[in-house]
Image (spheres, helix red, strand yellow):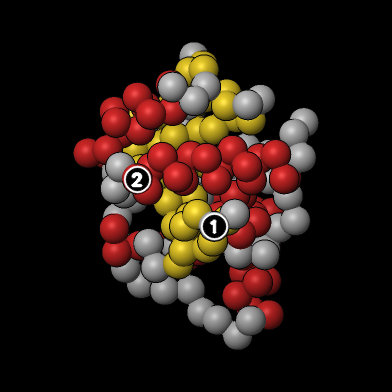
Amino acid sequence: MKTIKEKTQVLTNIAKHLNKENIVWAVGASTMLYYRNIVTEFNDLDLLVSEEDALKVKEILMKMGTLKKSTSGNYATKYFYEFIIDEVEVDVMAGFKIIKDDIIYDCSLKVEDIEDVVLVNGEEVPLDLLENWLYYYRLMDRSQKVSLIENYLKKNHLTAKEENK
Protein backbone atom coordinates (compact mmCIF):
# COMPACT_ATOMS: atom_id res chain seq x y z
CA MET A 1 0.00 0.00 0.00
CA LYS A 2 1.34 3.37 -1.00
CA THR A 3 1.67 6.14 1.55
CA ILE A 4 -0.59 9.20 1.61
CA LYS A 5 2.38 11.25 0.41
CA GLU A 6 2.88 8.95 -2.61
CA LYS A 7 -0.84 8.97 -3.45
CA THR A 8 -0.87 12.75 -3.07
CA GLN A 9 2.01 13.04 -5.52
CA VAL A 10 0.07 11.00 -8.10
CA LEU A 11 -2.95 13.26 -7.54
CA THR A 12 -0.75 16.33 -8.01
CA ASN A 13 0.57 14.99 -11.33
CA ILE A 14 -2.95 14.16 -12.53
CA ALA A 15 -4.24 17.59 -11.46
CA LYS A 16 -1.44 19.30 -13.38
CA HIS A 17 -2.40 17.49 -16.61
CA LEU A 18 -6.19 17.80 -16.23
CA ASN A 19 -6.04 21.48 -15.27
CA LYS A 20 -3.72 22.24 -18.20
CA GLU A 21 -6.32 20.72 -20.55
CA ASN A 22 -9.23 22.58 -18.87
CA ILE A 23 -10.93 19.30 -17.96
CA VAL A 24 -14.08 19.52 -15.82
CA TRP A 25 -13.27 17.21 -12.92
CA ALA A 26 -13.47 16.81 -9.16
CA VAL A 27 -12.24 14.46 -6.47
CA GLY A 28 -14.94 12.37 -4.81
CA ALA A 29 -15.46 9.53 -2.31
CA SER A 30 -12.83 8.91 0.39
CA THR A 31 -10.26 11.08 -1.36
CA MET A 32 -12.64 14.04 -1.11
CA LEU A 33 -13.37 13.17 2.54
CA TYR A 34 -9.63 13.16 3.22
CA TYR A 35 -9.11 16.62 1.73
CA ARG A 36 -12.04 17.90 3.82
CA ASN A 37 -10.34 16.47 6.96
CA ILE A 38 -13.18 14.02 7.61
CA VAL A 39 -11.05 10.87 7.30
CA THR A 40 -7.33 10.37 7.92
CA GLU A 41 -6.60 8.07 4.99
CA PHE A 42 -7.83 6.89 1.61
CA ASN A 43 -6.98 3.82 -0.45
CA ASP A 44 -7.28 5.06 -4.01
CA LEU A 45 -8.01 8.20 -5.97
CA ASP A 46 -11.61 8.67 -7.07
CA LEU A 47 -12.07 11.19 -9.85
CA LEU A 48 -15.34 12.37 -11.32
CA VAL A 49 -15.12 13.94 -14.76
CA SER A 50 -17.65 15.41 -17.16
CA GLU A 51 -18.93 13.02 -19.81
CA GLU A 52 -17.62 15.37 -22.50
CA ASP A 53 -14.08 15.04 -21.11
CA ALA A 54 -14.12 11.29 -20.34
CA LEU A 55 -12.23 10.07 -23.42
CA LYS A 56 -9.71 12.89 -23.19
CA VAL A 57 -9.03 12.00 -19.52
CA LYS A 58 -8.63 8.33 -20.48
CA GLU A 59 -6.07 9.35 -23.11
CA ILE A 60 -4.15 11.55 -20.65
CA LEU A 61 -4.06 8.92 -17.90
CA MET A 62 -3.04 6.12 -20.28
CA LYS A 63 0.17 8.07 -20.84
CA MET A 64 0.71 8.17 -17.06
CA GLY A 65 -0.12 4.58 -16.14
CA THR A 66 -1.89 1.34 -17.02
CA LEU A 67 -5.59 0.88 -17.70
CA LYS A 68 -7.01 -2.13 -15.82
CA LYS A 69 -10.00 -4.24 -16.78
CA SER A 70 -12.84 -3.38 -14.43
CA THR A 71 -16.47 -4.16 -13.72
CA SER A 72 -19.15 -1.70 -12.77
CA GLY A 73 -20.98 -3.64 -10.00
CA ASN A 74 -24.18 -1.85 -8.84
CA TYR A 75 -23.52 1.06 -11.12
CA ALA A 76 -24.65 2.08 -14.59
CA THR A 77 -21.83 4.57 -15.04
CA LYS A 78 -21.30 5.53 -18.67
CA TYR A 79 -17.50 5.71 -18.45
CA PHE A 80 -15.65 3.88 -15.68
CA TYR A 81 -11.88 3.41 -15.88
CA GLU A 82 -9.45 1.95 -13.38
CA PHE A 83 -5.83 2.94 -13.77
CA ILE A 84 -2.66 2.05 -11.94
CA ILE A 85 -0.36 5.08 -11.89
CA ASP A 86 2.90 4.72 -9.97
CA GLU A 87 1.32 1.77 -8.10
CA VAL A 88 -1.69 3.88 -7.03
CA GLU A 89 -5.22 2.89 -8.10
CA VAL A 90 -7.08 5.70 -9.80
CA ASP A 91 -10.80 5.31 -10.54
CA VAL A 92 -12.32 7.63 -13.11
CA MET A 93 -16.09 8.01 -13.45
CA ALA A 94 -18.03 10.03 -15.99
CA GLY A 95 -21.79 9.80 -16.16
CA PHE A 96 -21.72 8.25 -12.68
CA LYS A 97 -24.95 6.37 -11.98
CA ILE A 98 -25.94 4.22 -9.00
CA ILE A 99 -28.51 1.43 -9.20
CA LYS A 100 -30.63 0.84 -6.10
CA ASP A 101 -33.87 -1.13 -5.97
CA ASP A 102 -33.88 -1.32 -9.78
CA ILE A 103 -33.85 2.46 -10.04
CA ILE A 104 -30.97 4.26 -11.75
CA TYR A 105 -29.88 7.45 -9.97
CA ASP A 106 -27.89 9.94 -12.03
CA CYS A 107 -24.92 11.10 -9.97
CA SER A 108 -23.00 12.71 -12.81
CA LEU A 109 -20.60 15.53 -12.03
CA LYS A 110 -22.13 18.96 -12.48
CA VAL A 111 -19.98 22.08 -12.85
CA GLU A 112 -22.10 23.87 -10.24
CA ASP A 113 -21.18 21.16 -7.71
CA ILE A 114 -17.53 22.19 -7.81
CA GLU A 115 -17.53 24.86 -5.12
CA ASP A 116 -14.37 23.97 -3.22
CA VAL A 117 -10.81 23.72 -4.46
CA VAL A 118 -7.81 22.71 -2.38
CA LEU A 119 -4.17 23.31 -3.21
CA VAL A 120 -2.20 20.07 -3.26
CA ASN A 121 1.52 20.62 -3.79
CA GLY A 122 0.67 23.88 -5.55
CA GLU A 123 -1.93 22.34 -7.90
CA GLU A 124 -5.63 23.12 -7.73
CA VAL A 125 -7.72 20.06 -6.90
CA PRO A 126 -11.50 20.56 -7.15
CA LEU A 127 -13.69 18.73 -4.62
CA ASP A 128 -17.18 17.41 -5.29
CA LEU A 129 -19.90 18.58 -2.92
CA LEU A 130 -19.94 16.86 0.44
CA GLU A 131 -23.75 16.72 0.29
CA ASN A 132 -23.52 14.76 -2.96
CA TRP A 133 -21.50 12.05 -1.25
CA LEU A 134 -23.86 11.93 1.71
CA TYR A 135 -26.61 11.18 -0.83
CA TYR A 136 -24.47 8.73 -2.86
CA TYR A 137 -23.32 6.82 0.22
CA ARG A 138 -26.95 6.50 1.34
CA LEU A 139 -27.83 5.06 -2.07
CA MET A 140 -24.87 2.65 -1.78
CA ASP A 141 -25.88 1.61 1.77
CA ARG A 142 -22.51 2.70 3.14
CA SER A 143 -23.72 3.54 6.65
CA GLN A 144 -20.24 4.11 8.07
CA LYS A 145 -19.50 6.84 5.50
CA VAL A 146 -22.97 8.34 6.02
CA SER A 147 -22.29 8.53 9.78
CA LEU A 148 -18.88 10.13 9.23
CA ILE A 149 -20.38 12.87 7.06
CA GLU A 150 -23.39 13.43 9.32
CA ASN A 151 -21.12 13.71 12.37
CA TYR A 152 -18.84 16.14 10.54
CA LEU A 153 -21.80 18.31 9.52
CA LYS A 154 -23.21 18.24 13.07
CA LYS A 155 -19.83 19.00 14.68
CA ASN A 156 -19.31 21.96 12.35
CA HIS A 157 -22.90 23.19 12.68
CA LEU A 158 -23.54 22.68 8.98
CA THR A 159 -26.63 21.34 7.26
CA ALA A 160 -26.78 19.24 4.14
CA LYS A 161 -28.36 20.88 1.10
CA GLU A 162 -30.22 17.77 0.01
CA GLU A 163 -33.54 19.24 -1.02
CA ASN A 164 -32.41 19.26 -4.66
CA LYS A 165 -31.79 15.49 -4.71
Q: Which residue is painted at 29% across and 48% down in the image?
A: 22
Q: Which residue is painted at 64% across and 30% down in the image?
A: 88
Q: Which residue is mark 2?
A: 20
Q: Which residue is mark 1?
A: 122
Q: Please determine whether, in this image, residue 156 is positioned above or below residue 83.
A: below
Mark 2 and mark 1: Cα distance apart in space: 13 Å
Q: Position of residue 128 (x, y in %)?
A: 44, 57
User: Is disc 1 surrounded by few (<14), some (14 to 19) or many (20+) residues within 10 Å?
Assistant: few
Indicate which disc, 2 or 1, sits on the residue closer to the N terminus: 2
Q: Please determine whether, in this image, residue 89 is positioned above or below residue 94.
A: above
User: Is disc 2 surrounded by few (<14), some (14 to 19) or many (20+) residues within 10 Å?
Assistant: few
Q: Secondary structure at mark 2?
A: helix
Q: Position of residue 158 (x, y in %)?
A: 55, 81
Label 2 sits on what residue type?
Answer: Lys
Confirm or deny contact between disc 2 and disc 1 (CB under 8 A). no
Picture quarter containing residue 53? top left
Q: Please determine whether, in this image, residue 51 is positioned above or below residue 38.
A: above
Q: Is residue 157 left or right of residue 95?
A: right
Q: Secondary structure at mark 1?
A: loop
